[in-house]
Amino acid sequence: MLRPTSFDVAERAGVSQSTVSRALRNSPGVNAETRARVAAAARELGYVVDRHASSLRLKSSETIALVTICRPGEDRSAINPFYFALLGSIAAATSARGFNLLVSFQESAANFRADFVASGLADAMIVIGTTSNRTAWDFFAEAQAAGLGFTCWGSPGDPFHWMRSDNGIGGRLAAEHLIAGGRRRLAFIGPQRSPQRQFDERRDGFTAAATARGVTPILAEPPAASDRHAQGVAAARDLLARHPDVDGIFAASDMLALGVLQGLKETGRSVPGDVALIGFDGIRAGTLADPALTTLEPDLDAAGEALVAMALEDTGFRRSGTRIPVRLVARGSA
Amino acid sequence: MLRPTSFDVAERAGVSQSTVSRALRNSPGVNAETRARVAAAARELGYVVDRHASSLRLKSSETIALVTICRPGEDRSAINPFYFALLGSIAAATSARGFNLLVSFQESAANFRADFVASGLADAMIVIGTTSNRTAWDFFAEAQAAGLGFTCWGSPGDPFHWMRSDNGIGGRLAAEHLIAGGRRRLAFIGPQRSPQRQFDERRDGFTAAATARGVTPILAEPPAASDRHAQGVAAARDLLARHPDVDGIFAASDMLALGVLQGLKETGRSVPGDVALIGFDGIRAGTLADPALTTLEPDLDAAGEALVAMALEDTGFRRSGTRIPVRLVARGSA
DNA sequence: CTGAAAGCGCTTACAG
DNA sequence: CTGAAAGCGCTTACAG
């Protein structure tokens, strides 16, 4: 018998198929002794409930679909590790509820898909990933408009149900930390025209806090490049060429900051001696840098839990705009 | 209408439900005009085939389950990035076949699960992840024995259907590269008693090639620590204390190598000046190190494709023991 | 080329 | 507390 059914278990336990179902689902009103006999029969046969039949009947699959948007043509190993970490925390939150996680990496029209809930495969969908793939975000905006709802990390705003870090506070903490360390010639390096609001929020929090302390930061848009790291390298070179006296930099993300770090070294600057540097995201690679990267670290466990909770909320009621707390982790670079 | 069914589409298109099913599945023998009318009706209603009903009927879910074994208590962001990259390439291979990917991170008895295929949720299961969690691998060995088969990356051997890198060749390439660079006092740093064979293979390939060239490498077992990076730091300190004249190190993995790099710097060694260093895995963080890490990089696209292909093979016929090619990527550290 | 009908394996309202 | 039966939404053999 390749795959036993509940009828096979019923026969072995000497009860009806309905009783097997009730016993295995821990429905109330099943005799304890009967329940035990059914459990034993199921174990002996290696019986496992068929999830398709069960989900079809219950109209609920107890699974979350997670879409991670990538850069077109990007190697999978080049995906920003922040998103892998977020994926991991979403997986943890999902499994803590006994849910399954369906994962999909999408980058172009060739593999765009937003119908996981419509097909019954998942009860809710979460979208995370690079902010730089506009085509992808446009696709998901259309999907949302067509009724294929989802919750996302760090979105452009209103049409989406979103969640993001406490970016403004993170920016403020960065400014305070740099100024407390005696830095006065500050710069922010980050995308200024991203479709997503998070970078703007980091910049604005940083600028406001610095300005309040009498410092006006330079704002630097990183040049276009293959990825954030390459952008960081180039941005550091440009910035130092134009403003050789900069002594404190806040980069909008860790990958960008790691590039900036390399760029600084290449232009002969010591970190943190000549220039103090702070990133954002708390990715593991930051701890491996030399010097280790000081960063703003969002509480990823909270993020995963909140994303899953928000996604599972009935479509009618979703609290959009949840903020995930961030903390400054001071390491070697600032 | 919350979720239209094929009956709704049938009514709108003025055909029977069976015709809708045939038209949407591109079954042969459907009039072109009928097919178009059905497609239009489906589009207008936003109809998507219910995958549970479909899978139940077809007895195939077109999904792969991927289990990633973690260290107990390990933070999700601390998972070795090699496994995230492998996850990404498995996702790519899966989606290229039009399959879905169910992802599960497991670390202890609290969340061990191997019944994805038995429950019909997936057509096949792949297991990857840390070699250091023996409890987990024991659990999966039992599952395998109980008939819950799977394909895994870098396994202990015979009871499993496995696939791994061409570790022996990688070890040889490392030895050749170090010796060609003039190094003579070589060491291998890596687990010597791992339940998995991969580290042994890397060591043996390295040792054999070095010995053939008249060099006998020192073999160093890294001390126990929270993760590979921490092990690497400690291992470098130990090794240099005992053998101060070592001038070439091959570390069994990149995370270990990154730790060794830090340990070398802490003991005042320059890399590659005093000591040349080679890792294994090709993780992204290696490119961010200072100096960038020379490494043996497996072809992850091939690995993902092969893992999926092998897992999907009929249970009767599985070619175990496929080898994934590796290439030496020379960067700054050696 | 198309339709009526059986059946995939469950869950649960209904009856006892 | 337990059983017989309906029905979740598909796919496809069978009949026309």
Image: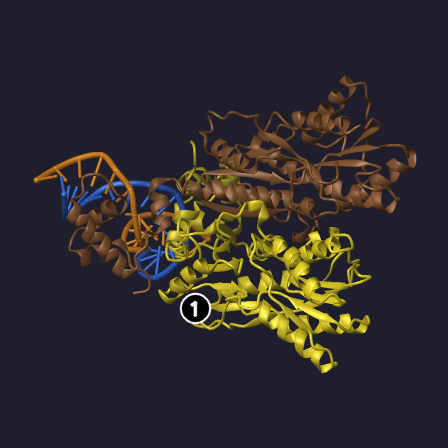
Chain colours: A yellow, B brown, C blue, D orange
> Is A280 on the left or on the right of C7, as rendered?
right
Tell me if residue B119 can be seen: no
Q: Nearer the viewer, residue B187 or A52?
A: B187
Quarter of the image with the C terminus of chain A in it: bottom right
Q: Say which amino acid is labelled 1.
A: Thr
Quarter of the image with the N terminus of chain A in it: top left
- Residue at x-position 56% and y-position 44%: B87
Q: Position of residue A184 (x, y in %)?
A: 77, 73
> Is B60 on the left or on the right of C15, as rendered?
right
- Residue B162 to residue B113: above or below: above
Residue B269 image-quadrant placement: top right
Q: Nearer the viewer, residue A253 or B20?
A: A253
The count of marks equals: 1
Q: Position of residue A113 (x, y in %)?
A: 41, 53
Q: Residues within 10 Å of mark 1 (few under 14, many from 20)?
A: few
Q: Position of residue A169 (x, y in %)?
A: 67, 73
Q: Nearer the viewer, residue B310 or A278?
A: A278
Tell me if residue B246 can be seen: yes
- Residue A41 to residue A31: above or below: above
- Residue at x-position 70% and y-position 47%: B72
Q: Position of residue A257 (x, y in %)?
A: 68, 59
> Is A109 on the left or on the right of A45, as rendered?
left
Question: Which residue was labeled with disc 1?
Answer: A315
Q: Chain of mark 1?
A: A
- Residue B100 to residue B142: above or below: below
> Is A30 on the left or on the right of A303, as rendered?
left
Q: Secondary structure at mark 1?
A: loop
Residue D12 image-quadrant placement: top left
